[in-house]
Image (tube, rainbow, N blue to C red):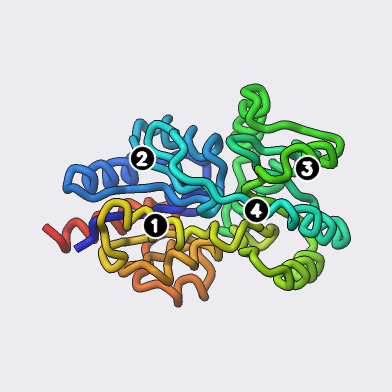
């Protein structure tokens, strides 16, 4: 009996145009009306995650930044897991040595050296799902976040790290060079206490070892008195694996890589064709 559903965003609940479809919304509302808790579980920051959910009219809680941050449906902070401050300069030195562009996530803000890096991130995610990126829509979203102050461009991160190094949730590296990414990943994996994952072929997501979706979903379920046997998770990428491995029922999107599909107990349609809604409807039919 499914009592909790945790859903990834990019490539999963979000359509290629970064919206939540009417079918996905209605399926979530049906799940909630049947007493099922529904939570977002994303690599995005809260400010990036909240917009599409708010625009759809849904009321959900949030596991953000791969589990580094958990917020309730009002956006109030429930828990936070930062990267150990002593590791930050080790991480950035490795990324810089391998010519990897990176962003820093602190509280609800994203710090970047280039707004173009933000664009490239979402373009890569779309291409990884074999979809055409909606360039104009992505640029509009990014510029709105810049205007709202959620994305901050800096020439250098040195002062930021010196002043707020203990507050960094996630370091997000991007590159179109697969070899550089692989070499950086291998070097980062030698640092104990870190979780290294990715949401697409062109990025690295670096968090504290305790900041993983699977750990956060398990803790969230426990807080609600729900066994992981009664949890369904839906995702499409490698940063979803930790929750797929722990949940009683795991669903891979049709646009997920083969090894993600292999790791799951079920496969749904792609995010272009309401895969989340289809998966939830199947569960509701089985339980009713």
Classed neighbour count for the residue bearing mark 1: other residues with Cα under 10 Å, few (<14), some (14–19), many (≥20): some
Q: Are marks 2 and 3 in contact (CB under 8 Å)?
A: no
Quadrant of the drawing holding the C terminus: bottom left
Picture residue at 45% right of the left edge, 51% below the top = 41
Q: CA distance from mark 2 to mark 4?
A: 26 Å
Image quadrant where residue 238 sits = bottom right
**Residue 219: image tag:** 1
Quadrant of the drawing holding the N terminus: bottom left
Q: Secondary structure at mark 2?
A: loop
Q: CA distance from mark 3 to mark 4?
A: 12 Å
Q: CA distance from mark 2 to mark 1?
A: 17 Å
Residue 45 image position (x, y, % from top left): 56, 42
Q: Nearer the viewer, residue 256 or 273?
A: 256
Residue 222 image position (x, y, % from top left): 32, 57
Residue 80 image position (x, y, % from top left): 53, 46
Residue that mark 4 sits on: 83
Of callouts 3 and 4, which one flags the residue occurring earlier in the amino acid sequence?
4
Residue that mark 2 sits on: 60
Q: CA distance from mark 1 to mark 3?
A: 29 Å
Q: Nearer the viewer, residue 124 or 105?
A: 105
Q: Are marks 2 and 1 in contact (CB under 8 Å)?
A: no
């Amino acid at each position: 009996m499914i009592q909790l559903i945790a859903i990834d965003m990019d490539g999963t609940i979000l359509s290629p145009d970064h919206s939540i479809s009417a079918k996905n919304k209605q399926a979530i509302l049906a799940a909630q009306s049947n007493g099922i808790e529904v939570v977002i579980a994303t690599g995005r920051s809260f400010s990036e995650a909240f917009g599409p959910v708010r625009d759809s009219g849904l009321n959900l809680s949030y596991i953000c930044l791969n589990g580094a941050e958990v917020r309730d449906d009002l956006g109030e902070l429930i828990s936070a897991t930062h990267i150990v401050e002593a590791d930050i300069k080790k991480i950035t030195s490795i990324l810089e040595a391998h010519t990897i562009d990176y962003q820093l996530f602190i509280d609800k803000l994203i710090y970047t050296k280039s707004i173009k890096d933000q664009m490239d991130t979402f373009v890569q995610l779309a291409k990884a799902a074999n979809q055409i990126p909606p360039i104009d829509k992505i640029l509009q979203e990014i510029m709105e976040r810049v205007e709202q102050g959620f994305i901050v461009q800096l020439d250098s991160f040195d002062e930021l790290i010196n002043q707020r190094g203990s507050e960094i949730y996630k370091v997000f590296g991007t590159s179109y060079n697969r070899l550089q990414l692989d070499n950086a990943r291998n070097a980062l994996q030698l640092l104990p206490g870190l979780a290294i994952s990715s949401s697409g072929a062109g990025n690295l997501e670096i968090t504290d070892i305790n900041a993983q979706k699977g750990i956060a979903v398990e803790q969230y379920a426990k807080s609600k008195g729900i066994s992981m046997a009664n949890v369904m998770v839906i995702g499409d990428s490698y940063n979803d694996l930790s929750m797929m491995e722990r949940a009683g029922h795991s669903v891979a999107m049709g646009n997920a890589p083969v090894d993600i599909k292999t790791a799951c107990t079920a496969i749904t349609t792609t995010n272009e064709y309401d895969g989340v809604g289809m998966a939830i409807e199947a569960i509701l039919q089985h339980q009713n």
